[in-house]
Image (cartoon, rainbow, N blue to C red):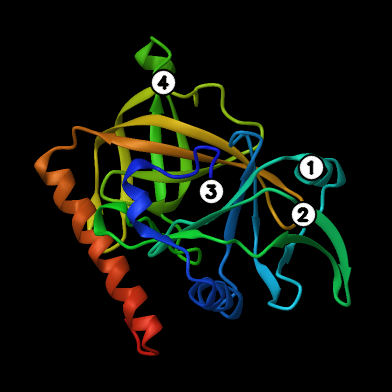
Amino acid sequence: MGYGTYLPDEEQYVVHNVKEIMQILTDLSKQKVMLKASFNHGHDIYLTTIIALSEKNNAVYLDIGRDDAFNSRLLASEHVVFSKEDGVRIKWLSEKITEVALKDGRAIKVAMPQELVRLQRREFFRLATPIVDPVPCQIPIDNGNPDQERVLELILADVSLGGICAIAPDPLDAALTIGASFDRCKISFPDVGVTSLTLQVRNIAQIHMKDGAIKYRVGMEFIEPSRGNQGLIQRYTFNLERIAIALMNGGSK
């Protein structure tokens, strides 16, 4: 795959079988799974879904963004990483991106990947948080004066045992910079409780939403969470897994 796409612990999970790759992508298409497309060394990101697959043309067709300037950068990029990060992680690299016209409108076309990563290990699980009942994260911003402290509230996109990913509006708050740490952060986990812990910003990426809006994904790591906070996080991720399994089986939570 190249281009530093594999992490050291992913190499043993690379799938090379063509029929298996086709089946994995077909499942993603049928389930309309949202994929993250990342390029420009991770500085540009947009969300997309697989529209169609063509074994005959050796092609995968995906939704294209609405911003023409953004699409131009996408089409000019040499490498685009497509990934699904919640539950079973799936990732592949595409090197040639073209725009095509399908009967339902514009789309992007990439070659059917010859290999992809399919990884299912508990410590890597990133579980998507509910959209209908969003999980808020309150981050105190210390300006050096207790009387002037403000609280930034973000909504979680996903959570793992090691950290969270939150969605921030545009323009991005100046306090959110890579490496910045925030104490006394409160995450209100439904049916579980409220944390008070330290979060450190590990990565920030701009997202172009399907409606044309710009937002930011802010990845934050839990820094030495207390045993009590670890218990809250574990109980909440367990609840999310239980709900996801129930939905997959067609049952209720």
According to the image, label 4 marks what residue?
Answer: 149
Q: Quadrant of residue 186?
A: top left
| Amino acid at the residue labelled 2 | Gly
Q: Position of residue 215 (x, y in %)?
A: 63, 43
Label 2 close to label 1 by CB (< 8 Å): yes
Q: Of helix, strand and loop, which one carries label 4?
A: loop
Which circle, 3 or 4, is nearer the viewer? Answer: 3
* 82 to 207, vertically: above or below: below
Q: Disc 2 or 1, which lies upstream in sequence?
A: 2
Q: Disc 3 or 1, which lies upstream in sequence?
A: 3
Crowd tier of the residue under label 3, counting other residues whose Cα lies within 10 Å: few below 14, some 14–19, many 20 or above: some
The one of 51 and 16 positioned closer to us in this rendering = 16
Q: Disc 4 or 1, which lies upstream in sequence?
A: 1
Q: Position of residue 40 (x, y in %)?
A: 66, 35
**Alpha-carbon distance for marks 3 and 1?**
24 Å
**Alpha-carbon distance for marks 3 and 2?**
25 Å
Q: Position of residue 210 (x, y in %)?
A: 72, 57
According to the image, label 3 marks what residue?
Answer: 1
Which circle, 4 or 1, is nearer the viewer? Answer: 1
**Alpha-carbon distance for marks 4 and 1?**
36 Å
What residue is drawn where x is 56% and y is 75%? 22
| Amino acid at the residue labelled 3 | Met
Indicate which disc residue 70 carries.
1
Indicate which disc residue 65 carries.
2
Crowd tier of the residue under label 1, counting other residues whose Cα lies within 10 Å: few below 14, some 14–19, many 20 or above: some
For residue 15, side relative to residue 60 (left or right):
left
Q: Disc 3 or 4, which lies upstream in sequence?
A: 3
Q: Disc 4 or 2, which lies upstream in sequence?
A: 2
Which circle, 3 or 1, is nearer the viewer? Answer: 3
Label 4 close to label 1 by CB (< 8 Å): no
